[in-house]
Amino acid sequence: MELQMTKRQWIILGALIVFVIVVVVFGVTQKPKQEEKPIVKEEPVDVVATGTKRVEFVPDVPVNATATKPKEQFVVGGSDNSFGVYDIGISKTGFSQTNLTVKKGDFVKVGIIGVDGEYDFSIPQYGTYISVQKGETKQVTFIPDTVGTFLFECRDKCPNGQKISGKFIVLPKQ
């Protein structure tokens, strides 16, 4: 069966196609205007979870910061990245290590150890949250891709009910 269209039908079809194209183009180019908000740049002095100010990330790293020596370190085949294994214990006295410094792009594996009770560990900027029982070790593995100083903390199940925090520092690759 052959489809035959009259001249009038072709004109209507062409007009319909042009109309659809115009609607699509107009819709794409006429995005709703978003309200402009003034940019307020906060210059935090430190990354902390206690007190009245809670800062999760600062794009700066401390002057003269050096990478923390890992418990174990492996070179990732054919690259200048490494795989470092670190341990952080949580006990009634706080974190066993309050600063952990690594290089951007390196693979990081952190063992979180519940020394004498049930605690939790969180790096809010990385979406990391784990809970550990007394004597238990859980692993967190990731590749830091942003240079700066990040907060890590005990968020919910903290020693003596007090929030504790530390710094996860990511140095630029050199």
Image (cartoon, rainbow, N blue to C red):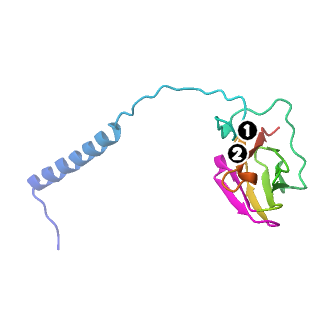
Neighbour tally class for label 1: few under 14, some 14-19, many 20 plus, Cα within 10 Å: many
Q: Toward the viewer: 101 or 107? A: 101
Quadrant housing the C terminus: top right
Three-letter residue code for mark 2: Asp
Q: Toward the viewer: 19 or 101? A: 101
Q: Which residue is mark 2?
A: 145
Three-letter residue code for mark 1: Thr
| Residue positioned 86% across, 31% down in the render | 64
- Image location of residue 20, percent across then percent down: 24, 48
Point out the residue furthest to the bottom here: 1
The boundaries of the magenta stretch are 118-136
Picture layout, residue 135 above or below residue 141 = below
- From the viewer's perspective, tell me whether residue 166 is left or right of residue 15: right
Q: Toward the viewer: 33 or 12? A: 33
Is residue 133 magenta-colored? yes
Quadrant housing the N terminus: bottom left
- Image location of residue 30, percent across then percent down: 32, 37
- Image location of residue 108, percent across then percent down: 79, 53
Between marks 2 and 1 in the image, the one whose residue lies nearer the viewer: 1
Q: Which residue is mark 1?
A: 149
| Residue positioned 71% across, 52% down in the render | 161
Q: Is residue 78 visible?
A: no
Total numbered circles: 2
